[in-house]
Image: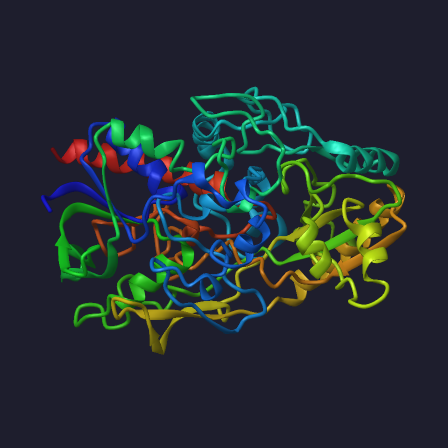
Amino acid sequence: MSASDVLIVGAGASGAAAAWRLAASGVSVTCLEQGGWLDQRSAPSLGADWERALQTAHNANPNIRRAAADYPVVDDDTPIKPAVFNGVGGGTLRWGAHFPRMHPSDFRVRTLDGVADDWPLAYDELAPYYEINDRIMGVSGLAGDPANPPREARPLPPLPLGPGGGAMARAFDALGWHWWPSDSAIASAPIDGREGCNHCGPCGVGCPRHARASVDLTYWPRALQAGATLVTGARVRRLIADRKDRIAAVEYVDAAGTAQRAVAKIVVLAANGMGSARLLLASASRAHPAGIGNDHDLVGRCLMHHPTAIVTGVFAARLDGYKGAFACALLSQEFYETDRARGFVRGYQMQLVRGSGPVATALGGYMARVPWGRDHHRRFRSEFAHTVSLTVTAEDLPEPDNRVTLDPVARDGAGVPAPRLAYRVSDNSRRILDHGIARASEVLRAAGAVDVVVNPLASAAGFHFLGTMRMGDDPARSVTDRWGRVHGTDNLYAIDGGVFVTSGAVNPTPTIQALALRSADHIAARLKEAA
């Protein structure tokens, strides 16, 4: 492979955004992705067995899915199981596409609440990049949300609330609580050659209409047209440092199983907060005995998820909640900011999730299992198409003992040690969840629910890996600087969720992509200055 200006590891949300921004700036870019292209036009959502696919070949957990492109994740020491995907598009290939931004307060947690650390940048620095990203992803939504700073008109109008969403909106109004139509990376009308959403429901197994944005459909066509090179089936083994402060090459195994080396002026990690931290730790050498960037034993530490409870209301009326984008209708940020009278710091978001399909309902779905036996069919009829759920998404604060390490035994197909997760839900996060469960139950009852069922912690909600390579100005307290450059290694950057200092209480993808665009501009300017 010929040398590039920039080599990116990972073709998901952040890698794709950076590849486009760099290539559009005239920078030569190569991206290595260990998965391949997924043809969403042939997604299982077209078949009657889409729910089976969601639990097998398209399962979010790589330990269940076991695709050729996956790597094992040792998860016996965490109640929250991994939900990641390898391929061109990464996690956006099977996400819900809920697209909220972080709040200005999320960047100033230490200043405001005396916990964690402030980010080395402010919301206003990201705001222009949020706007660029919204346009390219084709966001549907409604400007004017009083819980958030002003923003440009959304590229498309919001997705419909549906009967369940309408009932919940009226209940929030009755209680005087904030709610707003979700910003969603799902097209409500045709845009950029993508069709509008037809509200079929099985978003998690791919979108044949290309209504649901994923970066294989949004950023990668633009990046490739601008001259970026994408190499699929490339499983990265390690980074090779020729001296302590410089990466000389990236070693990987290509699709034919042959060992290769790629070189570039700058290397960028975009393999998610678990995968990128794993790669830094696996790149130990004489110059970096603890792994690259890990002189202060910080790589992999301060892992943050978004601990999630699910509260489901059963309604007498038919709500047809299995129709429509399953995670994109409305959100409430009434309890987002700190109020110490509640018994915790920071807060949470409530997000409407539509009802399960028939198989998931019969097997339990978000609810307690529908019992087998003589009463099964009656219970099924009373619950299928009669439920709506609220997720309680808690802000997770950084805890050093929550971390990603390398397993001493398990390996992937290229011999790289598997990541091992160690994670506990903190007391503060648990109090946030319990408060959210009580409030979600209250608003569901106000909407007319005849029964409320609670899942106090969703075990399958490990889709956000944040904080493992946190940014900061002090190398003794952070892994990367304010641009994502790894402290002490001049030509190595990280641009995925691992650089988060705090997690906020919202889905992180818009912020991850905004950070990636911002870092790409910094890298392009640096290369231009050096030319």
The answer to which image quadrant residue 325 occupies is top right
How many labels, in total? 0
Residue farthest along the left direction in this orientation: 2
- Give the percent coordinates (x, y) of residue 155: 53, 21
Nearest the camera: 453 or 27?
Answer: 453
- Give the percent coordinates (x, y) of residue 160: 68, 28
Residue farthest along the bottom direction in this orientation: 409
Side of 271 where 100 appears, left or right = right
For the C terminus, which image quadrant?
top left
Q: Is residue 401 above or below residue 13?
A: below
Q: Is residue 254 visible?
A: yes
Q: Is residue 343 visible?
A: no
Side of 517 where 320 appears, left or right = right
Q: Is residue 511 above or below residue 25?
A: below
The answer to which image quadrant residue 96 occupies is top right
- Give the percent coordinates (x, y) of residue 44: 50, 45
- At x 36%, y 46%, the residue is 495
Nearest the camera: 64 or 289?
Answer: 64
The answer to which image quadrant residue 159 occupies is top right
- At x 79%, y 49%, the residue is 440
